Image: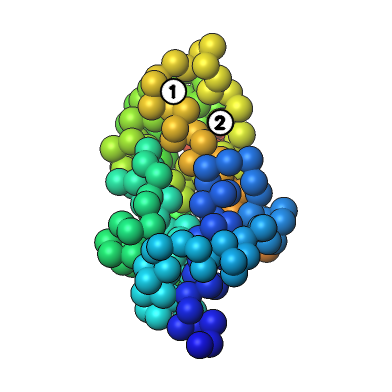
């Protein structure tokens, strides 16, 4: 059989993405290469699941599997391959829809963020340092997406400020791990981080100027 029917490519991609999100393995650093072999794959009893995934998603395997780990309902879970194969379509559609209109999505999220800051009379870095619970609540209630927080983290490095010593929310370690792992995947050639940084800086500078006006 050809590889597309066997499903080995789906297995190898899933194996690398799963390692990335659940261990210290870095998908970007190692370019998705792992020790996954055909022998390992052939010994699995769930090969039919990978065959099913590859038959339907052969052109976007990486994005399909990433979507399973950053879908809001899965952020504190380890997606199992059976669920990925049978119920993963919704997560992928949501992820693909956002990716296809990422600039628009990010602009909407930034507008929401700054409106929230204005409504609460917060400035950017103060709120990240002193109002962690309120900011985190925007994340866990899906008011602002993992895409937004990943880019915000790249610009402000707020994740390094939220340590167990100063933020002991029991949910944060799980969200933080998934957030940091996803952030690693979007660093690179994408222009969105640079655009996002520019928007954040310009909006924050504008707000400060307004605050100084009599």
Up-down: is 112 above or below 188?
A: above
Secondary structure found at label 1: helix
Q: Residues within 10 Å of mark 1 (few under 14, many from 20)?
A: some
Q: Residues within 10 Å of mark 2 (few under 14, many from 20)?
A: some
User: For the view shown, which residue lies furthest in the front direction?
Assistant: 43
Residue at image point 56% right, 31% down: 159
The reply to whether residue 156 is in sight is yes
User: For the view shown, which residue lies furthest in the bottom direction?
Assistant: 1
Any mark on residue 147, and which?
Answer: none
Up-down: is 96 above or below 58?
A: above
The reply to whether residue 107 is in sight is no
Asked if the residues shown at circle 2 and circle 1 are in contact, with their CB atoms under 8 angstroms apart, the answer is: no
Q: Nearer the viewer, residue 50 or 105?
A: 50
Up-down: is 42 above or below 79?
A: below
Residue 77: x and y in percent read 37, 41
Residue 27: x and y in percent read 64, 54
Task: Give the CA distance from mark 2 to mark 1.
Answer: 10 Å
Q: Circle 2 is placed at which residue position?
A: 159
Residue at image point 37% right, 52% down: 80
Residue at image point 59% right, 69% down: 38
Residue 127: x and y in percent read 47, 25
User: For the view shown, which residue lies furthest in the top direction?
Assistant: 165
Residue at image point 40% right, 44% down: 78
Q: Circle 1 is placed at which residue position?
A: 132
Which is nearer the N-term, disc 2 or disc 1?
A: 1
Residue 195: x and y in percent read 59, 56
Q: Nearer the viewer, residue 209 or 93?
A: 93
Colour option used: rainbow
């Amino acid at each position: 059989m050809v590889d597309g029917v066997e499903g080995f490519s789906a297995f190898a991609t899933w194996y690398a993405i799963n390692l990335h999100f659940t261990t210290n393995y870095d998908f970007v650093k190692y370019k998705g290469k792992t020790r996954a072999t055909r022998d390992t794959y052939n010994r699995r009893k769930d090969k039919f699941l990978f065959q099913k995934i590859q038959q339907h998603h052969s052109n976007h395997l990486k994005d399909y599997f990433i979507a399973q780990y950053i879908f809001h309902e899965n952020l504190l879970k380890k997606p199992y391959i059976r669920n990925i194969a049978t119920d993963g379509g919704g997560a992928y559609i949501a992820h693909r829809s956002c990716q296809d209109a990422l600039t628009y999505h990010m602009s909407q999220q930034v507008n929401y963020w700054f409106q929230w800051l204005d409504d609460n009379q917060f400035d950017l870095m103060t709120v990240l340092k002193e109002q962690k619970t309120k900011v985190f609540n925007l994340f866990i209630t899906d008011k602002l997406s993992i895409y937004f927080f990943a880019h915000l983290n790249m610009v402000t490095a707020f994740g390094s400020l939220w340590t167990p010593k100063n933020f002991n929310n029991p949910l944060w370690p799980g969200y933080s791990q998934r957030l940091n792992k996803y952030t690693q995947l979007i660093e690179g050639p994408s222009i969105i981080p640079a655009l996002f940084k520019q928007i954040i800086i310009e909006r924050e500078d504008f707000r400060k100027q307004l605050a100084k006006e009599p």
